[in-house]
Image: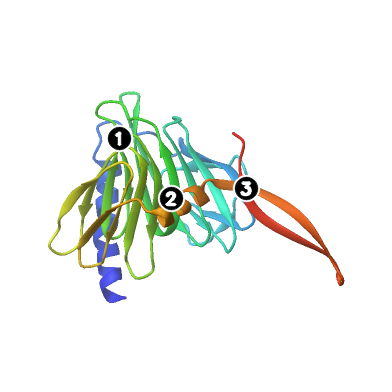
Amino acid sequence: MKWKNLILAFTLPLLVGFISGGKSSAPSDTPVALVKKIVKDVKYKKENVSDWEAAKTGLPLKDGEEVKTGSKSLALILFTDGSGLLRVRENAILHIYGQKENQRMNKNTFVQKGLVGFDVKKQAENEEFKFTTPTVVASIRGTGGFLDYSDDSTFTMSLDSGDVALDFTGVGGGGGMLHSRHTVTINSRGQFYFRQQNDNDRNLSNSTRQTEVKKIKINTDSGDLEINYYGSENR
């Protein structure tokens, strides 16, 4: 746990540099993203505020704000420039950052923990879209797939399309490229394990796209049983 906290303390200042290093950044009250959809327990927290508040559909997210999902919950987050959609699954915490410069916006989503599915459009030249965790920075041009950061500091990313540049920010550093139809796991020591997408990877990627809550009723001797489950959302 001390090692994880040390990495987190090292990574967060990098995010501050990402936001403050531009020549012309967006005003702090300008939304970077908005909450497109909520299922069950989703909360958000403003920058430099300790208390979590209940999130609502349509909530604008400003630079530095956080989103947290509870058990069996999810949030769909859409960046205001239309460049990316995040599908935040249960028990996840992420921070949203954005910096506007010359009519373009650089985005950085810090995934503190949890599973996030994503679809990111091809970025304009000199425009950035990054995912950051306490151990890894992933630079994206335009791709889809999922990212998972677990409690034991294991980073997993799988791509359905596109390419991603990966940098390990822990002791010793290291980096590599992840390509379409491939998966990488990076442990807390910075060891990279690449493989082609297998059935489990594809199933997990598909499951992140199941965002519509559906219901079925089953008749039993004890009465009707209602089951809620996720299905594909028609967008």
Please state the horizontal and vertical placement of residue 187, each as a whole percent of the image: 26, 65
For the residues carrying marks 1 and 2, which lies nearer the camera in this image? 2
* Disc nearer the start of the sequence (1/2): 1
In the depicted structure, whether residue 62 falls above or below residue 203: above
Please state the horizontal and vertical placement of residue 25, each as a whole percent of the image: 33, 34
| Number of other residues with Cα within 10 Å of mark 2, as a class: few under 14, some 14 to 19, many 20 or more | some
Any part of residue 130 in sight: yes
Task: Report the residue at 44% width, 56% height from top.
Answer: 115
**Amino acid type assigned to the residue bearing label 3 in the image:** Gly
Task: Report the residue at 65% width, 55% height from top.
Answer: 229
| Number of other residues with Cα within 10 Å of mark 3, as a class: few under 14, some 14 to 19, many 20 or more | some
Q: Which mark is residue 231?
A: 3
The front one of 208 and 95 is 208
Q: Which residue is mark 1?
A: 141
Please state the horizontal and vertical placement of residue 129, each as a whole percent of the image: 33, 39
**Amino acid type assigned to the residue bearing label 1 in the image:** Arg
Quarter of the picture containing the N terminus is bottom left
The front one of 69 and 98 is 69
In the depicted structure, whether residue 230 falls above or below residue 223: above
